[in-house]
């Protein structure tokens, strides 16, 4: 049970060292936003090889688990609930991201077509190594083990990140999945690894504490493009309905097709709609039944008390885009709440 229908969207806020361990900054940031019905962490790599940037967090070491335990303790003390988003970057990785991370892997040896942020700045991506069936099974196992660590870190559940052009979306997309085995070709085959992973994670934490996130046509990263995304994501939404998950989280910023209108009737469970929502649009979606929950990203960055601002119809702080990815508390902890706005103690 959630106290409201506002979700803190998973966002890459960086600010970890290359060890991927969350800090006191992360604990303070998420605790500030514990007024959300549900908070979802930024993407946590399931292994060193799964990283897509040098300063994002992970959940594959004891130190990372303890770092996240400090965060979840702070969130729970503030009355919040929090899921851990877990992911693998696939072809979006790079050998220079983190020392020892190794070469990126993907469904096929197809460079994703975009730049990669490394310890040495932005560089061009490299051609990934094609995964064998045995390696696919190993990564599915990595997700299950990471889900176990998320529970140990105090998270209330886990969100499997299958969006934003990362590994699962590389499998979904006909532009990056050229395989001829059981993980390529048909829509069902291209989605196989994802469903195997969802099943493995749900077996560890329970289906009622497992969520999944997808983003049809999200930004069209590089060559991670499917020739028939409506067919592919319609199949995903219908099939996920059989898993009895906590929710399906859909990020839709397509300018040519309304995926929320298309996918909501196909998915039988709790539906989270995200990307570009104002409070007014969010209310319209909830009242019409187009979504059960609404995730907010940028508005939650600049408004730590966003649910209360929405409830009272109060003005919203504007975001400063230049501080989204800085390495300090600036742009993370310094946005005022309504109490601070009013000058009250």
Image (cartoon, rainbow, N blue to C red):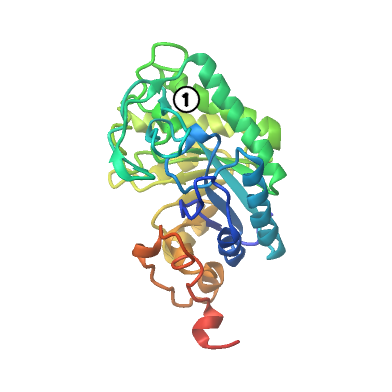
Left or right: residue 147 versus residue 177 is: right
Quarter of the image where the N terminus is located: bottom right
Front-lying residue, 128 or 260: 128
- Give the residue drawn at x 62%, y 36%: 146
Q: Is residue 61 above or below residue 102?
A: below
Quadrant position of residue 107: top left
- Give the residue drawn at x 48%, y 55%: 15
Q: How many marks?
A: 1
Left or right: residue 90 versus residue 21 is: left
Whole-percent x, y for residue 69 in the image? 68, 52
Whole-percent x, y for residue 38 in the image? 60, 55
Whole-percent x, y for residue 5 in the image? 57, 58
Whole-percent x, y for residue 182 in the image? 47, 13
For the question of whether residue 290 can be seen, the reply is no
Front-lying residue, 97 or 296: 97
Quadrant position of residue 276: bottom left
Query: For mark 1, what is the residue?
Result: 191
Tag 1: Cα neighbours inside 10 Å, few (<14), some, or many (≥20)?
A: many
- Give the residue drawn at x 38%, y 35%: 92
For the question of whether residue 75 can be seen, the reply is yes
User: Secondary structure beneath disc 1?
Assistant: loop
Q: Is residue 345 above or below residue 65?
A: below
Quarter of the image where the C terminus is located: bottom right
């Amino acid at each position: 049970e959630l106290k409201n229908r506002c979700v803190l969207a998973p966002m890459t806020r960086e600010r970890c060292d290359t060890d991927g361990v969350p800090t006191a900054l992360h604990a303070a940031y998420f605790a500030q936003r514990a007024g959300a019905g549900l908070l979802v962490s930024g993407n946590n790599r399931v292994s060193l090889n799964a990283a897509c940037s040098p300063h994002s967090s992970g959940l594959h070491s004891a130190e990372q688990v303890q770092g996240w335990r400090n965060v979840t303790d702070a969130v729970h003390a503030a009355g919040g609930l929090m899921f851990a988003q877990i992911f693998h970057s696939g072809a979006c990785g790079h050998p220079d991201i983190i020392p020892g991370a190794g070469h990126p892997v993907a469904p096929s040896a197809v460079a994703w077509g975009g730049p990669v942020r490394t310890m040495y700045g932005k560089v061009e991506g490299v051609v990934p190594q094609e995964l064998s069936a045995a390696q696919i099974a190993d990564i599915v196992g990595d997700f299950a083990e990471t889900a176990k660590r998320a529970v140990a870190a105090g998270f209330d559940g886990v969100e499997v990140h299958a969006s934003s052009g990362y590994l699962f979306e590389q499998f979904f997309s006909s532009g990056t999945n050229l395989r001829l085995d059981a993980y390529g070709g048909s829509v069902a085959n291209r989605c196989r690894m994802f469903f195997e992973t969802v099943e493995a994670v749900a077996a560890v934490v329970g289906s009622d504490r497992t969520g999944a996130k997808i983003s049809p046509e999200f930004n069209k990263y590089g060559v991670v493009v499917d020739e028939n995304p409506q067919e592919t994501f319609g199949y995903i939404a219908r099939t996920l309905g059989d898993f009895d998950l906590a929710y399906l989280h859909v990020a839709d910023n397509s300018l040519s097709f309304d995926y929320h209108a298309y996918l909501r009737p196909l998915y039988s469970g709790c539906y989270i709609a995200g990307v570009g929502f104002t409070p007014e649009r969010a209310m319209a979606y909830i009242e019409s039944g187009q979504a059960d929950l609404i995730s907010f990203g940028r508005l939650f960055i600049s408004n730590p008390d966003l649910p209360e601002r929405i409830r009272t119809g109060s003005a919203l702080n504007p975001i400063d885009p230049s501080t989204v990815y800085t390495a300090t508390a600036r742009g993370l902890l310094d946005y005022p709440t309504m109490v601070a706005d009013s000058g009250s103690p």
